[in-house]
Image (cartoon, rainbow, N blue to C red):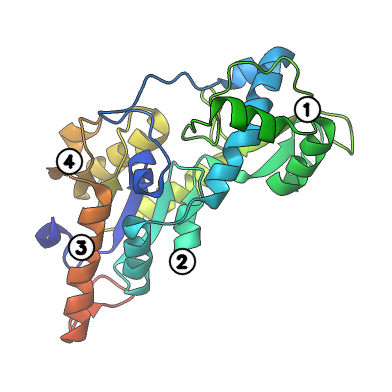
Amino acid sequence: MLDLLDGRRVCVLTGAGVSTDSGIPDYRGPDSPPRNPMTYQQFVGDAAFRRHYWARNHLGWRFMDAARPNLGHRALARLERAGVVHGVITQNVDLLHTKAGSRRVVDLHGSYAQVRCLVCDHRISRWTLADRLDAANPGFADTVAAATGVEIAPDADAVVESTDHFRVVDCDRCGGTLKPDIVYFGESVPKPRVAEAFSMVDAADALLVAGSSLTVMSGLRFVRRAARAGTPVVIVNRGATRGDEFASIKLELGCSEVLDAYSATKSSACTTGRCMSAGNSVVE
């Protein structure tokens, strides 16, 4: 992998597998339990689904907010500072790349930390909504967590069986439906965000995929685009991916160990006078 990426500007596409070492589970890893995330159609079309989602998310988002970057996230931030990685496209909503110090990040599916109104598009922070939901459901979080424990899903959702008694709040400006600023299954990624990600892929000399099964088209399309352009694709993922046929190299290893080792190699090169410039060449 190091030989193929050496001297190239690298764009990185990450999935849930890059965050498992931060305690956030993935959707489709070899040891992952079956998961049925809520679809956009269910959320907008059924008040009971919305109540169920917000009750679970009211517990789960706090665990995601408390998660901290792991070796893999920090390695990518170092590689960006070294001029090796010129951008990260992430399918994750956990903001861990930004927390680790990466500066050029496309949060393809949004983030857990913001909520928007589907009617007036007013946006508030998840902390602000938490205060309103706490007021509407006093003691809910503590009572449920104490009774059942909390199992977290990759989208800041928590596994809670009974949510019938939970009260949902609406937009305090127009009374519209509030939704996490996250792209749900069945929902389209905003076009400007896709265009920014395509631009990042087009400007790269190599695409590194870390921790994604590429099951959904929102990630696979970038691999296909790189392959059509003749750009080398390196995939690091435990288990098969839909992009394996396009990969120049496929490593069945953990993301943290590979990315940290790669970063250490580039850091060593810089200390001996060889490191990436802002362009495509290696500087002696």
Q: Earlier in the sequence, mark 2 or mark 4?
A: 2
Q: Earlier in the sequence, mark 1 or mark 4?
A: 1
**Residue 96 position in % (x across, y down):** 47, 54
Residue at far front of view: 146
Q: Which quarter of the rendering shows the C terminus?
A: bottom left
Name which residue type carries label 3: Tyr
Name which residue type carries label 4: Ala
- Identify the residue at image location x=42%, y=57%: 69
- Gap between marks 2 and 3 measured at Cα: 17 Å
Instruction: Choose between 222 and 122: the one closer to the eye.
Output: 122
Instruction: Choose between 237 and 150: the one closer to the eye.
Output: 150
Q: How many residues crowd around disc 3 within 10 Å: few (fewer than 14), some, or many (20 or more)? A: some
Q: Secondary structure at mark 4?
A: loop
Residue 89 against residue 28 in the figure, above or below: below
Q: How many residues crowd around disc 2 within 10 Å: few (fewer than 14), some, or many (20 or more)? A: some
- Gap between marks 3 and 1 measured at Cα: 45 Å
The residue singled out by tag 1 in the image is 177
Marking on residue 101: 2
Name which residue type carries label 1: Thr
The residue singled out by tag 4 in the image is 247
Q: Earlier in the sequence, mark 1 or mark 2?
A: 2
Q: Is residue 5 left or right of residue 183?
A: left
**Residue 213 position in % (x across, y down):** 30, 33
The residue singled out by tag 3 in the image is 262
- Gap between marks 2 and 4 measured at Cα: 28 Å
Instruction: Choose between 23 and 250: the one closer to the eye.
Output: 23
- Gap between marks 1 and 4 measured at Cα: 42 Å
Q: Earlier in the sequence, mark 4 or mark 3?
A: 4
